Amino acid sequence: MKRLFTTLAVLFVGTITMATAQQANERPIYLDPDAPIEERVEDALSRMTLREKMAIIHAQSKFSAPGVPRLGISEIWCTDGPHGIRPEVMWDEWDQARWTNDSCIAYPALTCLAATWNRDCALSYGRSIGEEARFRDKDVLLGPGVNIYRTPLCGRNFEYMGEDPYLASEMVVPYVKGVQEQGVAACVKHYALNNEEQHRHTVDVSLSDRALREIYLPAFKAAVTEGGAWSLMGSYNKYRGTYACHNHRLLVEILKQEWGFDGAVISDWGGVHSTEEAIHNGLDMEFGTWTDGLREGASNAYDNYYMALPYLKLIESGEVGTEELDDKVRRVLRLTFRTAMNNDKPYGAMCSEAHSLAARQIAEEGIVLLKNHNNNLPIAPDAKRILVVGENAIKMMTVGGGSSSLKVKYECSPLDGIRNYYGDDVEVLYARGYVGDVTGDYNGVVTGQNLVDKRSPKRLIAEAVEMAREADHVIFIGGLNKSNNQDCEGTDRRSLDLPYNQDAVIEELAEVSDNLTVVFVSGNAVAMPWIDEVESVVQVWYLGSEAGNAIANVLSGEVNPSGKLPFTFGVKLEDYMAHAEGAKFPNPKKVFYHDGIFVGYRGFEKREIEPLFAFGHGLSYTTFEYSNLQLSATEAVAGNRIDETILEATVTITNRGDRAGKEVVQLYISDVESSVIRPKKELKGFEKVELQPGESKTITFSLTPEALAFYNENSSSWTVESGEYRVLISASSADIRLDKSFTLR
Ligand code: BGC
C-alpha cells in the first residue's frame, strides 16, 4: 500500500476591507495599533497613490525602504545579520558611517549554533540578537542563513547550519521565533541553492526535484511554516535558468502557494536582473541593485531600480496591470505593521550582560571535542606551564568574511581567554608558529591589531618547538580565517587543506609534545593528515565576543564539551559526493547537482567511505550509556496526516562518568525496503539531555509519517511506503547504540 501526501497549497487570501469613509477626526484604521493587521494593510493600500506604492517596494538607501511619509507609514530598516548587528553604513555606500554607538555583541557563527543541537540555544540566540536589532531600531534582520553544506569549499558555510535538513530545520525555527518576539522580522536567506560563492552571481543550478525537496528546501520551509518568518531573501544564483530572486517556481509556486508565505520576499543586494520577471515571479522588495551613490546623474539613482521607474512605465503604458503591485505592497505593509509600526514590541537592549552570557553559553555548547586520546583534555590541574601556538589564538575574527563582518564592543581572543582563566597560577606562554593573513579591516572597521611578523616559517616553527619541549600542555590554535578563499563570502576555498603551512607546525609540535591539543577556529572541515600524531582535536568555530572565555572553559574542564558536528569531516575532498570523480567546483555557469540527495553523511554512507569525523560526532569528558530502547508498538498505521504521531520510541541515557555532562541523543530512520533508492539512514529526531554523574533520564521521541517519507517525483508529493523501518538510536551518525524495527501497515 502506498500513501500519497499531497502538499497542501495554501493560498494567502487577505481580508478585503476597503477603506470606508473616515470621519474627519477619526484615526484611520491603518494607524490603529489595535486593529487587525489585515485591516490596516487594506486601509493603507486604499489610500496610497501609484507612485507611493512603487516607492515602498524598493530601496531608498543601502539598507532602507522609504515607507509613505505623506501617510506617516514608517520606513523599513534592514541590517545584517546573522551573527550580530552590522555597524551603520553610509546612505549610499558600503563604508561604515563611523558612528560611535553601534558596536555590538558578536554571537557565535551559525555553524556553532547548529553544533549545539540545542533548540533552547537557538531561541536564546534569536532573542538576544533580536533585542540588539530592536534597540538599534532595525525592522528586518538579514538572517539566519540555512543553505545546506554541500561542499566544504563553500566560503560561506560558516554562516549556515550544516549539512542536514532536519537539524537545520529544528534549529532555524526557534531562532526565527526569538528574533520576531522583538518585533523584528527574520529574513531567512539565501533562498535557494546558494551553495558556492565565487560565481554566485552567474551560476545556474539544476538538480532533481527530490534533492530540492528532501535536502535544500526543508529548512526554509520550516522557517516559514513553523517559524512564521515574516521575510525571506532570494539568492543570487539562478535555478533552472532563472535568477532565484525572481524565480516563479521557487517564489510563487513553492514559497507562496504551497507554503502559504504571507511575508515579503526581499532580493539579495544586487540580485535583481529583470523588471518583467520581478513583477511576475514573486519578488516583493528590491535592494542593492548597483548604484554609484547619487553620482549617476539621475535625480535619484534608486529610481533606476528594476522595480522603480521601469515598472511604473509599464503600468502607465498599460502593458502591465496593478494586481501584482498591490500584492507586493500588501506584503510590504504587512511587514511594516509587524515590525516598524508594531506598538507592542519591546524596547530591546544592546550589549547587555545577558547578551554576553547567552553568547558564551551558546559558544560553550557548540564547541566539539573531536578527539581526546588518553584523556589529554581537560588540561591537567597540575599543569604549571601551558604553551599556546598559532595565529588564530590572537587574531580578531569578527572583522572580515563579508556582510556578516561586525564592529564589536569587545572580542576575547583564545589566548586572552586562557590567560584570564588561569591567572597567575599557571604560566601561559605564546609562540606565533605561522603567519597567515595579517590584514584586519572590512569597510572601514579595523581590528587595530598589528600582526606583522617577518620571521621565516622555519624560525617560527623552531621557536614554537623549543618552547613546546618545556610545556606541560601545548595548545595549537589555527584553522581558517575570514580572508578571501578561506571562510569568506564571495569566494570559495581552493582545497580542503589547512593554509599557511599549519600542517608542518602541527607535525613538528607533535614530535616533541605528548600533550598536544589542536584547536580549530573555522566554519568548515579541514584535512588532518597528522591526526594519529596528536592527542586532542577541538573544533571551536567562530565564537564571537566570548570566544576566548568559552574556549578556556572547555579546555580547562570548567565546562564539559557537548557540541556535535553539524557536518561531516572527510579525509579528502573527493570523499564528499559533490566532489566525486573530479567534479568541477566552483562553477561559473551551469551546474547539475549529480550528488542528488546524497549530501553529507548520506553520500559517505552510500559510497561506504569512512569519514575523518562523522556527522553528529562529538566527545565528552564523561561517558554515556544508552539502554532500554522501547517502541510503543511493533506495527504502526499511517493515518491521513503526515505530522500525526504514529509511534513513540523511548530510550534511557545514563551518565557513567564522574562529571556532569550533556549528551545529544540522535534518532535516525532507515527504510529497510523501498521502491526508490534511499539514504542508508536519515536524522529524524534528537534531544540534548543534561545528566549528573550516575543520573539516568528517559527520552521519548514521537515519530510521524513525515519521518518516513520520501519525495516522489512521479506524483510530485511526499510518499510513505508500508514495510519495515529501523529506528537507530545513536551518539553520532557512525555510532549506533541501539536499534529496533517496526512495520508500517
Ligand atoms: C549578501 C547578503 C547580505 C546582503 C546585505 C549580500 O551580498 O549575500 O547575505 O545580507 O549582501 O549586506
Image (cartoon, helix red, strand yellow):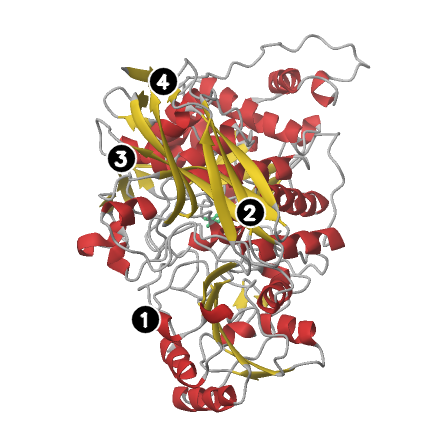
Question: Which residue is denoted by mark 1 in the rendering?
Answer: 529
Amino acid on which disc 1 is placed = Pro
Amino acid on which disc 4 is placed = Phe
**Is the N terminus in the top left, top right, bottom left or bottom right quadrant?**
top left
Q: Earlier in the sequence, mark 3 or mark 4?
A: 4
Q: Is residue 599 visible?
A: no
Q: Is residue 728 left or right of residue 171?
A: left
Q: Is residue 466 left or right of residue 679?
A: right
Question: Which residue is denoted by mark 2 in the rendering?
Answer: 654
Question: Which residue is denoted by mark 3 in the rendering?
Answer: 678
The spot of residue 713 in percent (x, y) is: 25, 25
Q: Is residue 520 visible?
A: yes
Amino acid on which disc 2 is placed = Thr
Contact between labelled residues 1 and 4, with CB atoms less than 8 Å apart:
no
Q: CA distance from mark 4 to mark 2?
A: 39 Å
The spot of residue 82 in percent (x, y) is: 55, 48
The spot of residue 253 in percent (x, y) is: 37, 23
Please tell me which residue lies in front, 334 or 515: 515
Mark closer to the observer (4, 1): 1
The spot of residue 197 in percent (x, y) is: 37, 53
